[in-house]
Amino acid sequence: MSRTTPPRPLDVEALFPELSAYRGTTTRLHPRPGRPDVAASSVGGPLLWPTNEPWPMCTEPHSHARGRRPADIRRERQILASAWLREANPGPTEGERQLLEQLGQKHRVQEAATTDPVPLIGLAQLCRRDIPDLPAGPDDCDLLQVFWCPFDAHGPTGYGMLLDLRWRRSWEVTEVQTSPPQPQVVGFEGYVPEPCVLYPEQVATYPFAGLLPEDLCARIDAWEEALEEEAEELADDDAAVVGYQYDLSIPPGWRVGGYASWHTTDPSPMDCRTCSTPMHLLLTIDSSEWDGGSGSWKPLEEQDLPTHRSATPTEVTVGRWGKLNIFACPEEPGHPHRWSIQ
């Protein structure tokens, strides 16, 4: 079943005609629980990885001997999902609570040394044939595969994430690796994705307000303030106030292309560190598909579903329930990627 974004609450170009010059597109991926095929675009699904190529590993020295087992994390999610779906007495039973306590325990891998490589987790696989806004990779590669280390132990602070993006030509993979190596334990359950099929949908998008010309940004701010004041005068706590950021410009959730949101930090230049070209947003990995502030983007097919059960299909968590924006060089897609957490 496809997923369809509702029409926007207002025509933003009718309000601010100058925005027509900035209109772009982004492809909402709409990941939903399922059983993706190895050749399909997916989140957390099997990857089209050749048997004769080593699986990506984290080779940075860091502690990775203690954490939760991925199988325990997935079993915990299954129990909780079933428990809250019960019509009578929803929630875990006493027996389930005891099992959940056991599943939540951390385990130690005795033989793991800080210098041992750690298998990366295959996070996503995106194919150009499925996703309109996915650009061609280097040497006309059509398949992007995204990996990350299951521990926050990287970079100058020792608490950063490690990403690894690989481009390949899908037609060149003839023998697929069916049992890739997996980490025995992970440092954070948010690094373990649930298998999801994708329902790509291309929608219109506009830049983050802070990156628009100063006079246009000021007019948008004044318009939003007027709407908020009007809602306060009406004393209607249930009235939904439409905002440029949350309703009219940048959709939430996993998506490819378009504009990055800078709602947590000030906008930061993302220039290629190899050739200094301004980079374009390649992929956004989000902790949720929508929330209380961005509910107007909830697909038409899922309007009746409760947010707490349907808005986090991948079970991926970025930072403190944020989103990860990954940027690519438009001049040479083979140049190293950059990213920012919002």
Image (cartoon, grey):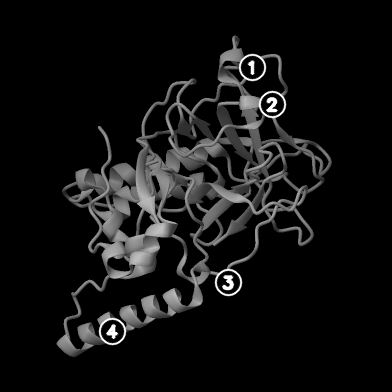
- The residue type indicated by label 2 comes to Trp
What secondary structure is found at the residue carrying circle 4? helix
- The residue type indicated by label 3 comes to Asp
Q: Report which quarter residue 307 is drawn in.
A: bottom left
Which x, y percent locates residue 13? 31, 63
Image quarter (top left, top right, bottom left or bottom right) of the C terminus: bottom right
Indicate which label's residue lies in the foreground, 2 or 1: 1
Indicate which label's residue lies in the foreground, 3 or 4: 4
What's the distance in space between the residues labelled 3 and 4, CA to CA? Answer: 24 Å
Which of the pair 142/97 is nearer the observer?
142
Which residue is denoted by mark 1 in the rendering? Answer: 50
Give left or right: position of 259 versus 6: right
Residue at x 37% of width, y 59% of height: 20
What's the distance in space between the residues labelled 2 and 4, CA to CA? Answer: 55 Å
Confirm or deny contact between disc 3 and disc 4 (CB under 8 A): no
Question: Which comes sooner in the sequence, label 2 or label 4?
Answer: 2
Confirm or deny contact between disc 1 and disc 4 (CB under 8 A): no
What's the distance in space between the residues labelled 2 and 1, CA to CA? Answer: 9 Å
Identify whether 153 is placed above or below 137: below
Which of the pair 34/87 is nearer the observer?
34
Which residue is denoted by mark 3 in the rendering? Answer: 266
Which residue is denoted by mark 4 in the rendering? Answer: 226
10 Å crowding of disc 1: few (<14), some (14-19), many (20+): some
